[in-house]
Image (tube, rainbow, N blue to C red):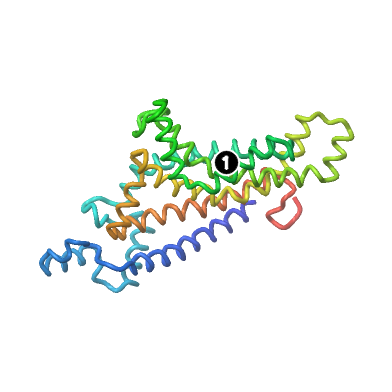
Amino acid sequence: MLKFIFKRIGYLIITLFIVSFINFMLIRSIPGDPLGEMARKLPEQSKVNFYAKYGLDKPILVQYGIFIKNLVLEGDLGESLYYPGRKVSDIIKKFAPTSGRLGLQALTFGVLVGILMGIIAALNRGKWPDYLIMFIAILGISVPSFILASLLQYFFTVKWKMFPPVGWKGFKYTVLPTLALSFGSIAVYARYMRANCLDVLGQDFMLTAKAKGVSKLSLIFKHLLRNALLPVITILAPQIAGVFVGAFVVENIFSIPGLGKYLIISITNRDYTMIMGQTMLVTFLFVVSLVAVDILYGIVDPRIRVGGGKK
């Protein structure tokens, strides 16, 4: 297992370097000047000083080399172009926990509810609970989180006044953003879990367990859930990064003090360092979650051998 983990960490580091290089080149290829409208108003010497301060006057490969050196040796993502004097790493450290809490809360709720709904749909195949859950799943996949967030905000804050419309001052403020973000996860996990449960229910060992008189609860938790859960874990990794990114948009709708505001501002104002810092954060979350999911396979199903040999 240790050999497997170290191998995956090696892949993680290589992937981060490759993605960082591609992102760096793509971001620098965005048309326009990072100074924006100011570029036409500032004296030529001021522009030269600005480019020199941020290293934008150097060849692009040299800029990338400086970025990697500072990141690896000092953990420094550079200084924001739009917010002079503020380090990108400091902004991420300050506001990422809020985005992370919202994303984790939404993912946890979405996974648990989605798995439960998938099991219920499979056990009631062809009946009204199955049709209702699949209808909800179709809606969850079709309706973007920001549309759902706007609808929730309108009904639960404007019309019914059950929750605060904006802000981040306590658990009550997290309910609507969490629901908006988790709806997509609920839909995905409900569909996958239903399909996997139906497949497992048709297996010989399940029919044998039923014939032996195994109780329904034991049949679900000891036989059905464990075998149906493994394929579902596969989609957990992209969901982790996906929900975190989705939180950026929802944060702006509910005025949540997370990284969402900085992502949108950095893109619209060509803040290269801020864009790079946030894309690296999402990439890191994605590849780390892939490693975590691989390890989780062995925990859920001990029959899986990651080392290739017998234990």
Task: Residue at 35% x, 45% y: name it.
Answer: 93
| Left or right, residue 294 beside residue 250 | right
Image coords of residue 224 (percent x, y): 75, 39
Task: Residue at 41% x, 40% y: name it.
Answer: 150
Residue 17 falls in image quadrant: bottom left
Residue 172 falls in image quadrant: top left
Give the class, few, some or many, for how many residues have Cα within 10 Å of label 1's Cα (few <14, many ≥20): many
Task: Residue at 89% x, 35% y: name it.
Answer: 211
User: Of 235 and 280, which appears nearest the observer?
Assistant: 235
User: Of 126 and 149, which appears nearest the observer?
Assistant: 126
* Amino acid type, label 1: Ile
User: Of 298 and 4, which appears nearest the observer?
Assistant: 298
Where 160 sits versus 270, above or below? above
Image coords of residue 92 (percent x, y): 35, 47
Image coords of residue 99 (percent x, y): 41, 42
Where 22 sits versus 240, above or below? below
In the picture as drawn, the residue positioned furthest to the right comes out as 211
Q: Return the residue at label 1.
A: 186
